[in-house]
Image (cartoon, grey):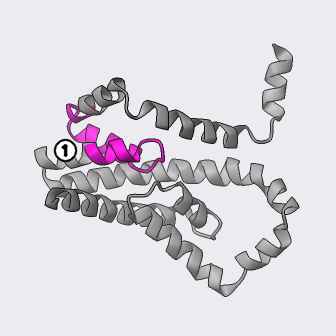
Amino acid sequence: MNQLIENYKNWKLKNTFFLLVSVVFLFYFVDTPLAKNIIDSVKDLGYPGIFLTGVFFVSTFTVVPASIVLFYLAKEFNIFEVVLLAGLGSMVGDYIIFRFLKDKIFEELKPIFLQLGGSHVSKLFSTPYFAWFAPALGAIIIASPLPDEIGIGLLGVTKLKNWQFMILSFVLNSFGIFVIITLVDLL
């Protein structure tokens, strides 16, 4: 047992592995009756449920159910309350992912990156084009209904301060939530 724990501690790609496993788990879990019951029960929580749903709006694993719940919550509550509270929740969710990617995933993948031609890619990252393209693309991804992890990753390789990231995340996610709620309502 001690050897197993020691192997786990020394495993360099453990966070990346669990990220991939959770993506596979999502595709299995998302269409089950249990998931649908959980989504319905979140609606009963009111404002804390809106905030909590916003936290789940940012993840690959939960963006679709969270979008559906936000749409129904916007029918029961003021749309601007839903957008602002879910935007705050999304900011918190993005920040958690941002810190996780920056502190764990990027460090784990750095040796692999360097072995696969890291110096060439590093030169690309330091070009003036990348300096504006990566944050712009990351912002577009965060504002879109696409899961935020890729956008957060693009913003994570820039020199964005935590407070700047949080403000950007709040504004972009709030905008994205507003667009999704209003577009679905028009259809």
Q: Can residue 46 be found in the magenta stretch?
A: yes
Q: Quadrant of residue 125?
A: bottom right
- Which residues are the magenta region? 42-68
Residue 89 lies, with reference to residue 181, above or below; the image says above
Picture quarter with the C terminus: bottom left
Identified by mark 1, the residue type is Leu
Q: Can residue 91 be found in the magenta stretch?
A: no
Residue 67 in the image, given as x and y percentages of width and height = 31, 48
Count of numbered circles in the view: 1
- Pick whichever, 43 or 23, lies toward us: 23
Residue 145 in the image, given as x and y percentages of width and height = 38, 58
Q: Is the magenta region chiefly helix, strand or loop?
A: helix
Q: Is residue 86 left or right of residue 80?
A: right
> Mark 1 highlights which residue?
73
Q: Is residue 78 left or right of residue 42?
A: left
Residue pictured at 31% horizontal, 65% vertical: 175
Q: Is residue 78 left or right of residue 127?
A: left
Crowd tier of the residue under label 1, counting other residues whose Cα lies within 10 Å: few below 14, some 14–19, many 20 or above: many
Residue pictured at 84% horizontal, 62% vertical: 116
Q: Residue furthest bottom?
A: 128
Residue 185 in the image, given as x and y percentages of width and height = 16, 57
> SS class of the residue under badge 1?
helix
Q: Quadrant of residue 183?
A: bottom left
- Pick whichever, 144 or 99, lies toward us: 144
Picture quarter with the N terminus: top right
Residue pictured at 20% horizontal, 37% vertical: 46
Residue pictured at 81% horizontal, 35% vertical: 11
Q: Quadrant of residue 10?
A: top right
